Image: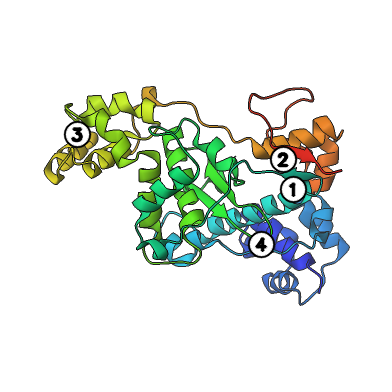
Amino acid sequence: MSKVGSMLRLARQLRGFPQNEAAECLRLPNTELSRIENGLKEPTAQLLDTAAEIFSVPVEFFGQTDAIYGAPISVHAPMWRKKSNVSATELHRIVAELNVRVMHLRKLLEATDLDPVNKLPRFDADEYDNDAEKIAGLLRRFWQVPDGPIQDLTALVEEAGILVAHSDLGGSTVSGVRFSVPGMPHIIVLNRQQPADRMRFTLCHELGHVIMHGYPTPNMEEEADTFASCFLVPTEDVKPYFAERRVDLRLLAALKPEWKVSMGSLVFAAKRAGFLNETQARYIWKQFNIQKIRLREPPELDFPVEEPRTLSDLISLHINDMGYSVADLSKVLMMNETEVAKTYSIELPGQEKGRASHLRIIQ
């Protein structure tokens, strides 16, 4: 069966068009577009040319035969519907972006070999009594993470073969999402509009899903939050930082750049470590509200965003080592040149980055 209709739907959702609006732009009845997208009718060449222009994709985009996947378990209907500010159109747009990223990755990996530095274990939550703090400690030991703050969480995650990307996520308020499909590395996409502390927590939250959750459970989001909190700020490691000190906004602000987590995360850590009781924690949260820093902590405490490397290394390998131009990549990835350059932050040939690549060309 032809997949042209499926790819037409993917392009429409990628650009944030509801079906009725797309049908109007394409000048055909909504029912006809529905039949085309569901494979009940073949589109004309003229329709595909028009769709390519409206959705800003090469017409060759519609000829791809890759499998298209639905939403990952951590963002499936019941959990996302609680986020009243995330519309169905935004959800479709994010899932479409994830599918396109997988399609790109599949093409890019045809010429390269991804060689993770660390293994990626599985610690199923139900096998550890749903104790996310224990699992966080096990993973730190498995990866031999030194005690104390993690300096570059993104590097640590990518060294285990997980790909990390930054995106606007269709302009939504979703902080991040992970995507796992058969035969491909896990992908975690983070919303680049959030501060670095939130990006690190979101990345660690999604890592928790990868490690602990093979299927949906009622408490999986809370477990992933606990995992992230304890992986980034282990209870025993943080105790010396609170010992014989008053836990207040001043101390939390001082510790934030050292631990690279939010002041709010440090409140939870102090409570977990026994340095705040319920009443004291409630008082500090009131101070957050008075200072109006509950939703956005002081910008002067922000630290630099961690930059992912693996995807940019893949692109760099094609350009610098294999002689691809941006136009060549555009044809391979079936995306216009401007979008390829923006999506993958393409650098000029010959530019190098500090961290060593763990990619090699397949001979």
Of tags 4 and 3, the one toward the viewer is: 4
The residue labelled by disc 1 is 56
Q: Are marks 2 and 1 in contact (CB under 8 Å)?
A: yes
Q: In which quadrant will I find the C terminus?
A: top right
How far apart marks 2 and 1 lie (CA) works out to 9 Å
Of tags 3 and 2, the one toward the viewer is: 3
Q: Amino acid at mark 3?
A: Gln
How far apart marks 1 and 3 lie (CA) works out to 48 Å
Q: Are marks 3 and 2 in contact (CB under 8 Å)?
A: no
The residue labelled by disc 4 is 182
User: Looking at this rendering, what residue extends furthest in the bottom direction?
Assistant: 40
Q: In which quadrant will I find the N terminus?
A: bottom right
* Label 3: how many Cα within 10 Å (few below 14, some 14–19, many 20+): some
User: Residue 207 placed where, x, y %?
Assistant: 49, 49
Q: Amino acid at mark 2?
A: Glu
Residue at 86 percent across and 60 percent down: it is 46
The residue labelled by disc 2 is 339
Question: Left or right of 27: which side holds 196?
Answer: left
Residue at 45 percent across and 47 percent down: it is 139
Mark 3 or mark 4, which is nearer the start of the sequence? 4
* Label 1: how many Cα within 10 Å (few below 14, some 14–19, many 20+): some
User: Looking at this rendering, what residue extends furthest in the left direction?
Assistant: 279
